[in-house]
Image (spheres, grey):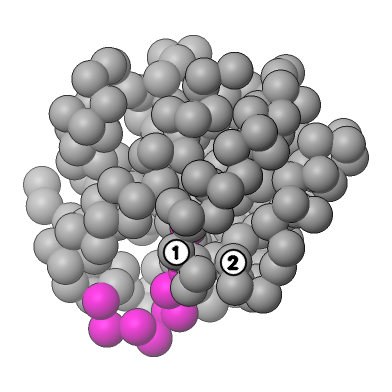
Amino acid sequence: MTFNGFTAQDFATFSIDGLEERMEAIQNRIQPKFQEIGSELVDHLQSKLGNEMFLHIAKHARRSVNPPKDTWLAIANNKRGYKKHPHFQVGLWDDRVFVWLAYIYELPNKNEMAEVFLQHLDQLEQILPQDYDLSLDHMKKSNEQIKDVAIKDVLDRFKNVKSSELLIGKQFEASDPILTDGSKFLNEVKSIYDKLIPIYQMSLEK
């Protein structure tokens, strides 16, 4: 199968009431697209990184009452899971698609990775495109951009605050026409990942 883009129905999934009903829509509408997207992105990342990468699609298994407000795929260098590792994401809220390199609170060596970033702050600031987006909490929508923050302050918080996270990449409004063109969108995601790969590799040098 070929990924042909996202539709208004995909975003409307998050207005469906009820955990079971929304999960059924996520599984039927979005997850097959994640499988298509993820398969191509895994191949791309493996060719760029020179090591095996694994696709994980969010199952939202811990939820028992509240339906998920977003959903995502993750690609990591670990077959068993992604949350304890730096990973690449593509996902949806009701109003946007996000493309992240993600470091979330479950990283066991978050402090060490933050320290590596701080030690290479000048290099990091040169790598980071100023128009890229930033999130410090994967459970909340974020409208911050790199150009609007002090990276050192962000990294200090990432290092010293247990719940702090670091997600870097780009977001696309649901109305963005690139989302309806599967080939263009995938090429854009690959381009974003290519810019973020040096940061990913830097974080693994701890």
105 is higher (above) or lower (below) than 109: below
**Magenta segment: does it hold 205?**
no
Q: Residue at the right extreme? A: 161
Residue 59 can be seen in this image:
no
Quadrant of the frame with the C terminus: top right
Measured as percent of width and height from the top left, residue 78 is found at 45, 16
Q: Locate residue 113, reporting x and y percent.
A: 65, 27
- Dot 1 amino acid type: Pro
Residue 36 placement: quadrant: top left
Left or right: 168 with respect to 28? right
Q: 46 above or below 58?
A: above
* Relative to 200, residue 14 above or below: below
Q: Which residue is pictured at 66% across the width and 33% down the height?
A: 119
Residue at figure coordinates x 25%, y 51% from the top left: 190
Instruction: Determine whether the residue tagged by mark 1 lies in a helix, strand or loop.
Output: loop
Quick one: label 2 or label 1, which is nearer the N terminus?
A: 1
Circle 2 packing at 10 Å, graded few (<14), some (14-19), many (20+), is some
Residue in the picture at 40% in, 33% down: 75
Residue 36 appears left or right of 76: left
Indicate the position of residue 191 as horizontal and vertical percent values. 26, 56
- The one nearer the camera, 136 or 159, is 159
170 in the magenta segment: yes
Image position, residue 173 (x, y; %): 45, 79
In this figure, which residue is indicated by the disc labeled 1?
Answer: 129
CB-based contact (under 8 Å), mark 2 and mark 1: yes
Q: Which mark is residue 146?
A: 2
- In the image, the segment drawn in magenta is 169-178
Identity, as a three-letter code, of the amino acid under mark 2: Ile
Question: Residue at the front extreme?
Answer: 122
Would residue 18 appear left or right of 72 to someone viewing this image?
right
User: Would residue 160 be found to the left or right of residue 195 on screen?
Assistant: right
